[in-house]
Amino acid sequence: MNFKILVVDDEEIMCTLLKEVLSAEGHDVYTASNGVDALGVLEEEGCDIILSDIRMPDMDGLKLLHAIIERDPEKIVIMMTGYATLATAREAIKEGAYDYLMKPFDIEGVRRSIKKAAERRRLYLENERLKTIMPLFEISNRLIETRESEQLLELILMSAMNQTKSPKGAIVLFAKNNDLPLSVLKRDLELDSSHNDLGKKAIEKLLSGANGLLVTRNDKHPLIGKMPRVKTLPFAGEPGAGDAVLCPITVRREDTVGCVIVQKDTTQDSFSEGDCDLLAVLSNQAGTSIENSRLIKDLEQVSVSTLQSLVLILEAKSPYTSGHSLRVSRYARLIALELGFDEKEVKRVEAGGMLHDIGKIGVSEDILIKPAPLTPEEYEQVKRHPVIGDEMLAPLAYLRDVRPLIRHHHERMDGLGYPDGIKAGMLSVSERIMVVADAYEAMLAKRPFRGIIGVKNAREELLEHKRTQFDADLVDVVIRLSEKGSLTLDE
Ligand SMILES: [Fe+2]
């Protein structure tokens, strides 16, 4: 392993000699003639090993040692000494120097000492690298155990903040072809999507293909110019806000779909190269998680569409049931909206309405389209369809929430329904919506041996079975919607 070595000596011939010897070993060697120049080289190059003379003009070797150790106690400093300064060299070891070399040099001795120092530096760097990797192992183990996309993003954000010691952070997901955030998961971060630099300007830069952004007031930030991913951005955040790093989240290596942002306070040290590497890995995980979640949702959508097609095909076989489930789904949705349900629950009752009769696939077609009254045995077969539907969907985890709506759409408030004969108190409001939406559609629609009874009669029938068959409040809601002209047989 090759290192950057700095030789500091006011005798030019010493610098030239050591540069020649150590370059031949494969190291990159820099030289300086005094302590002040040496600190300048260290600032620019960040050398791993420093070989320093003790007696030098301006700043001597001991002062240089102190200055180096104060900035980075892990730097390896080897003092070069003549007999006259031997006591000082020994003192330097106590103060943090790694070793000393006696002048005049034995070249083999110099090589041996540098080899030992290089090995120690290698072990230190390896240890630092492991310290970065270990948290990533822990994070990836937890990511494997976490399936929900939202929880994954939450975990990624918390890991990004913890690992970079940032008190503030956010994950922003963009709408496609739009620079406005689609959703934002944030922790104490002031993120104004339209006004400040951490919002709109940064996001514009990310969308234009930047690999990552460092937002800082410090024009001499050590990461500028060292990492191709880092670009500066004029900072206009709130006064207490420190440096920030934004890492793009990409999906399928092309689209930037969002970004991970972490921000420090002004009292903290800024971000290191290791921090940025870790953020890049976490952003990559976020991209993979979003992509997986999208693929799963696509598959689920295909699966639901297939089930819906099955229902439509089944119902189309009889003029009396054609379009029944579509209408029940629409009624259920309108009732749920009237009750102020949230979007997730509205979608659940909508899906329940669409799939509530899916179990009829398991009932003989001859019975379903029989142009005459059913025998008691045939009726018993029809009554099995809620259980068949519930069991059909059991393997589909993403429809788990919809199954109770399917199973219970023929229950009654007085407990005389089927298949479980449970009473109102055991039925959720969404299940009761299924009961009334299904029955009201059946009342409105044309039926064999009965024809169409009309809206007025249907409402009366609802009122007649209020509390026994149907939930009383929901009957009122249905009648109200019906009076507004909402629940009709037409689309
Ligand atoms: Fe049914």
Image (cartoon, rainbow, N blue to C red):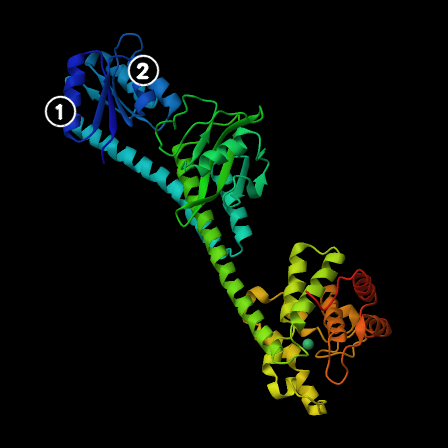
Residue 91 placement, left or right of 413: left
Image quadrant in which you'd find residue 104: top left
Residue 251 x, y percent position in the rendering: 43, 48
Residue 364 x, y percent position in the rendering: 60, 86
Q: Earlier in the sequence, mark 2 or mark 1?
A: 2
Q: Which residue is mark 1?
A: 107
Residue 350 placement, left or right of 232: right
Give the camera-side residue of 35 and 275.
275
Image quadrant in which you'd find residue 223: top left
Disc 2 on helix, strand or loop? helix
Residue 19 x, y percent position in the rendering: 17, 22
Image quadrant in which you'd find residue 131: top left
* Quadrant position of ligand 1: bottom right
Quick check: can you spot residue 103?
no
Total numbered badges shown on the rendered structure:
2
Three-letter code, disc 1: Ile
Category of crowding for the residue at label 1, using alpha-carbon neighbours closer than 10 angstroms: few (below 14), some (14–19), many (at least 20): few
Q: CA distance from mark 2 to mark 1?
A: 23 Å
Q: Which residue is mark 2?
A: 62
Q: Is mark 1 within 8 Å of ligand 1?
A: no
